[in-house]
Image (cartoon, grey):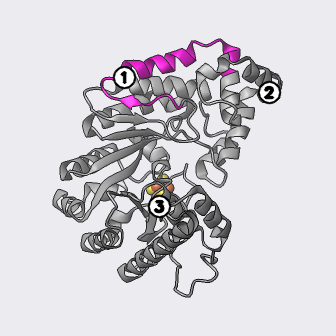
């Protein structure tokens, strides 16, 4: 089999940005702009010290064509290997070995292996492109990858709030059918404190514009962001904002105090008092309890979330979600600590797994170590969390 990357005479190069939402882990990544136009949120480390720019549409179109060529080559390799023309684990493994030459090629392989139906537009706020330019990019994706069914993008509420519904509807018509928004909180006090650069009202108007245009809307909430002082306001105001938006998805993405961020510096200078894991679960309980009269899917798909089981459809699953949270909060102190440590170490994923004697045996010494930590168990858990981020 020829070497997919090294022997290829045609240009296979294209740009890939640094992040995508967890739900887009297997999507084709098309970079339409670079970095974040706002770049000031105190909890966010991603694009710091990098300047925002819109990429010329011609360059993005050339990237999409290059990805199309990669797709064709990958399918040739898969046919050589398996005779069926399909992507196999072996082919993906082979591509991943070559991928250091270009990380995006491994992403194309993942996209194909997952059915080749979803695309994510990078980076932080693609809606800042002129609507005709963005529509052109989306149409190019549909032309080169006609089997794609879902095209999504991040967008800031501040931008969405001033984008006319008709403009969003045109983008939907072109094929952009889902928007991810980092709502984080509905509390104006907290939005200001973390320098989110928008208000609760803009979150609501931006979200409603997306819904009214007929697109799917995914709103990210950040449990823990209010810390000890603002957790109740954070929970109540966020629930109130989402009750007014009624998004398709509410996704939990818990706060991580990442190094290099303003919030981490505040914490180091004793200016931010974070909630411990139990406090975050209590906050999520209050938040879920406040969600009312909406039809949204709650998703807990971020690695920093303690409880993955907080997932379900509202309104029908609301009581079950509260029961999951209460079930955790009613555990004995030592079991809650054991679960927190086990989850952060990757030893378990659900509370039920605490029933396994093997897991308890494995985690008992870590619980002792955490209890003996000079700054308390929460400090050890914070150390473990930083390994994930
Ligand atoms: S708008 Fe998003 S990407 Fe930009 S700084 Fe804030 S959280 Fe980070």
In 3D space, how far apart are the residues under numbered discs 1 and 2 (Cα atoms)? 34 Å
Label 3 sits on residue? 112
- Count up the numbered dots: 3
Q: Which mark is residue 366?
A: 2
The residue at the point 69 percent across, 18 percent down is 356
* Residue corresponding to mark 1: 318
Whether residue 340 sits left or right of residue 194 in the image: it is: right
* Image x and y of residue 101, in percent: 65, 74
- Foreground: 214 or 253? 214
* Residue occupying the point 53% across, 63% down: 109
* Residue at disc 2, secondary structure: helix
Residue at x 55%, y 33% (from the top left corner)? 227
Q: Position of residue 207 (x, y in %)?
A: 28, 47
Badge 1: how crowded within 10 Å, few (<14), some, or many (20+)? some
Q: Is residue 273 left or right of residue 52?
A: right
154 shown above or below 226: below
Query: N-terminal of the two: label 3 or label 2?
Result: 3
320 left or right, relative to 14: left
Q: Is mark 1 within 8 Å of ligand 1?
A: no
Look at the numbered disc 3 and say if its residue's Cβ is closer than 8 Å to ligand 1. Answer: no
Where is residue 119 drawn, in percent x and y? 40, 60
**Residue segment shown in magenta:** 308-337
Position in image of residue 389 (x %, y %)? 64, 48
Farthest residue to the front: give it: 83
Between 3 and 203, the one nearer to me in the picture = 3
Q: Is residue 222 above or below residue 147?
A: above
The residue nearer to you, when weighing 15 against 146, is 146
Q: Is-magenta flag for residue 239?
A: no
* Label 2 beta carbon within 8 A of ligand 1: no
């Amino acid at each position: 089999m020829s070497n997919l990357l090294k022997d290829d005479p045609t240009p296979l190069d294209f740009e890939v940005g640094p992040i995508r939402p967890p739900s887009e882990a297997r999507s084709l990544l098309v970079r339409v702009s670079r970095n974040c136009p706002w770049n000031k949120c105190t909890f966010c480390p991603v694009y710091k010290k990098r300047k925002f720019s819109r990429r010329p549409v011609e360059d993005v179109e050339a990237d999409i064509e290059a990805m199309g060529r990669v797709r064709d080559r990958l399918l040739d390799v898969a046919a050589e290997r398996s005779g069926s023309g399909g992507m196999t684990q072996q082919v993906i493994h082979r591509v991943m070995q070559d991928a250091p030459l270009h990380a995006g090629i491994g992403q194309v392989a993942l996209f194909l292996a997952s059915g080749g139906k979803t695309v994510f537009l990078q980076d932080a706020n693609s809606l800042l492109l002129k609507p005709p330019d963005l529509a052109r990019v989306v149409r190019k994706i549909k032309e080169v990858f006609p089997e794609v069914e879902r095209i999504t993008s991040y967008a800031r509420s501040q931008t969405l709030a001033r984008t006319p519904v008709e403009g969003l509807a045109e983008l939907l018509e072109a094929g952009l059918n889902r928007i991810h928004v980092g709502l984080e909180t509905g509390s104006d006090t907290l939005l200001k404190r973390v320098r989110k650069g928008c208000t609760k009202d803009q979150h609501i108007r931006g979200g409603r514009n997306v819904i009214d245009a007929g697109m799917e809307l995914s709103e990210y909430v950040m449990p823990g962001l209010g810390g000890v002082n603002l957790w109740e306001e954070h929970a109540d105001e966020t629930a109130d904002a989402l009750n007014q938006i009624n998004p398709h998805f509410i996704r939990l993405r818990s706060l991580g105090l990442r190094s290099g961020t303003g919030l981490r510096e505040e914490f180091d200078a004793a200016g931010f008092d974070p909630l411990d894991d139990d406090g975050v679960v209590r906050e999520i309980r209050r938040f879920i309890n406040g969600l009312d009269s909406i039809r949204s899917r709650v998703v807990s798909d971020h690695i920093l979330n303690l409880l993955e089981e907080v997932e379900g459809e509202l309104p029908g699953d609301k009581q079950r979600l509260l029961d999951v949270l209460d079930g955790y909060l009613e555990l004995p102190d030592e079991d809650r600590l054991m679960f927190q440590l086990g989850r952060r170490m990757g030893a378990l994923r659900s509370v039920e797994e605490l029933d396994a004697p093997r897991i308890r045996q494995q985690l008992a010494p870590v619980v002792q170590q955490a209890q003996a930590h000079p700054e308390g168990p929460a400090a050890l858990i914070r150390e473990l969390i930083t390994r994930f981020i």
